[in-house]
Image (spheres, rainbow, N blue to C red):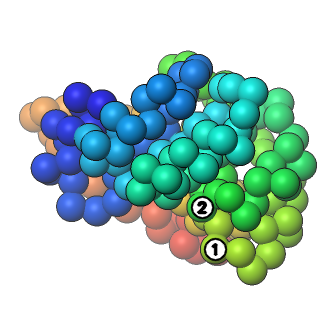
Amino acid sequence: PPAVAAFRRHVKTVMDVHLMIAPVDPYIDAFAKAGADILTAHLEAGPHIHRTLQAIRGAGMKAGVALNPGTPAEAVEHLLDLTDLICVMTVNPGFGGQKFIDMTAKVRRLRAMIGDRPVHIEIDGGMDPVTAPLMAAAGADVLVAGSAVFKGGSADNPGVYGENIRAIRAAAEAAS
């Protein structure tokens, strides 16, 4: 929460906070007070995901649920009316720079299950100009990129970051 509070004054758009911790519930109010707009918890992080999603919304934030690569899409089918975002992990949580795990079929199943509900599908892990179009074409509408954004840049050469972001965005938009 202190990091979110420090970033909040610099973030003029939506602050999407993805917690890869267990348990999540004791921290919900602190992240709301710090300024998070969306709070995403892993389905696997606790035994009462319904309670967690209700608490996130009750704290005034949009609620997201994340799925690890080994968790099937059907695990969130009963949660679709309680969530604003489903985050599909395309790496195993833990550290940046991992190899992309293809979750195209899972994203397609989720998009079909969601139907006309206003639920976003977010992809986290291994996004770059090659993988972004695969996920966009399958139905994802939010892409999280880390290592691919920072590749080749530095404090002395920050322009590369913008170029990398534009390349990922253009590749995704061309596929959707």
Describe the element under mark 2 as helix, strand or loop. loop
Q: Tell me residue 79's x, y (percent).
A: 76, 54
- Residue at 46%, 63% in the rendered image: 169
Mark 2 Cα shell of 10 Å, populated few (<14), some (14-19), many (≥20): many
- Residue at 61%, 40% in the rendered image: 52
In the shown orientation, is residue 100 left or right of residue 56? right
Q: Tell me residue 30's x, y (percent).
A: 34, 34
Residue bearing the label numbered 2: 84
Q: Amino acid at mark 1?
A: Pro
- Residue 89 visible at all: no
Compared with residue 122, is residue 51 higher up or lower down, i.e. above or below? above
- Residue 93 visible at all: yes
In the shown orientation, is residue 112 left or right of residue 151? right
Q: How many marks?
A: 2
**Is the C-beta separation of discs 2 and 1 under 8 Å?**
yes
- Residue at 51%, 47% in the rendered image: 56
Q: Tell me residue 42's x, y (percent).
A: 64, 34
Compared with residue 76, is residue 43 higher up or lower down, i.e. above or below? above
Residue positioned most to the left:
156
Name the image quarter holding the C terminus.
Answer: bottom right
Compared with residue 6, is residue 120 higher up or lower down, i.e. above or below? below
Q: CA distance from mark 2 to mark 1?
A: 7 Å
Compared with residue 116, is residue 51 higher up or lower down, i.e. above or below? above
Name the image quarter holding the N terminus.
Answer: top left
Q: Please tell me the numbered disc located at residue 118.
A: 1
